[in-house]
Image (spheres, rainbow, N blue to C red):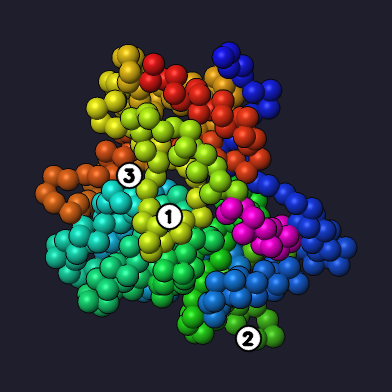
Amino acid sequence: MELKPFAKRVWLSSPTMHGEELAYMTEAYETNWMSTIGENINRCEESICRLLGCRHAVALSAGTAALHMAVKLAGVKPGDKVLCTDMTFAATVNPIVYEFGEPVFVDCERETWNMDPAALERAFALYPEAKVVILVHLYGTPAKIDEIRAICQAHGATLIEDAAESLGATYKGRPTGTFGAFNVISFNGNKIITGSSGGMLLTDDDAAAAKVRKWSTQSREAAPWYQHEDLGYNYRMSNVIAGVVRGQLPWLENHVARKKEIYRRYQEGLKGLPVSLNPYLPEIMEPNFWLSCLLIDETAMCPQERTDTTVSYITEPGKSCPTQILETLSALNAEGRPIWKPMHLQPIYRSNAFVSACEGGDVGADIFRRGLCLPSDHKMTDEQQDAIIETIRRCFD
């Protein structure tokens, strides 16, 4: 059949609005609570605490701001080594450098694409002075949390959980974002629940939550004038943005269900091709399926060459590569993306240490070379997804 470009672009993961968002934003406008105080913020924080079962949720301007606050809470000082997920977005890592710490990148494993516990154990052997670990749940799939927490406890290290991509996912029935001493979620525009921006710092530590509330409002002291004894930040969430989040939160279960349906339809539609989707361990974890990702079998990869800014490939019958599939999807007017480029391959961080489970190993680089993120938008129709699946199949003709 002929595949014509979609009249309207199918996005990777765009916001899905339901109407309540505008009502709460309008409430902020009409009551004149347009700043960083207001009912929307209060209700969002309360809702997340109930939903996830944490004691405190502090609404901030971005997930990155929340990660920065978590790094400060963990006590990272200049020169301190912080062990962190390697295959992730730069926002996971940059807050370490804000505090002049030194990221040490820990390779992923193939069963979940998340931090490899064996690589983490090896990183502690190489850097026993490290006392902070930042763990990411990539693309909404939980990591092997029990193993990683046990390793952190054995080495006296603080665990920070970056659950920016995994709101709504669970590990052994418990929500991600509740396992670390300090945890982070994001409401960025493409996340499963969006505020257009915004994030939260989650913790059960009363004193830590109080510190973040103070730090994020320029560290103002309880005085009749503007009194400052600590360095502060303008990191609090706007009551207008909180109105969007407040309207979105009741739809989380619906969004997760739709994302899972998209994942399952890709799984079924791509059967028989030399590919697999981003994996997870169903007996202990339930992802939120934020993004469906594709990994091409090594034997089915056509030649592909990447530099820091360019890429080229040579077509071969029966084979393909991420670049060819992404270009073909783009011609169909659908958005896909490469897998996160591992941090140790990024020009800014190439001089930082990288630790894999074995000498010379590099699982993340291999997944980056052979993987891509598929269009995973809530609003994608079955007919559009079928066309995307057929487009991918034709890349292997």
Q: Horizontal and vertical percent for residue 235?
A: 58, 64
- Magenta residues (range): 240-257
Q: Nearer the viewer, mark 3 or mark 2?
A: 3
Amino acid at the residue labelled 1 = Thr
Going by the picture, which residue comes out furthest to the right?
30
Amino acid at the residue labelled 2 = Ala
Residue 339 versus residue 301 in the image, above or below: below
Q: Nearer the viewer, residue 253 or 220?
A: 253
Which residue is disc 2 drawn over? 222
Q: Secondary structure at mark 1?
A: loop
Q: Secondary structure at mark 3?
A: loop
Picture disc at residue 342: 3
Q: CA distance from mark 2 to mark 1?
A: 42 Å
Image quadrant in which the C terminus is located: top left
Amino acid at the residue labelled 3 = Pro
Residue under the image location 72 percent in, 49 percent down:
17
Q: Secondary structure at mark 2?
A: loop
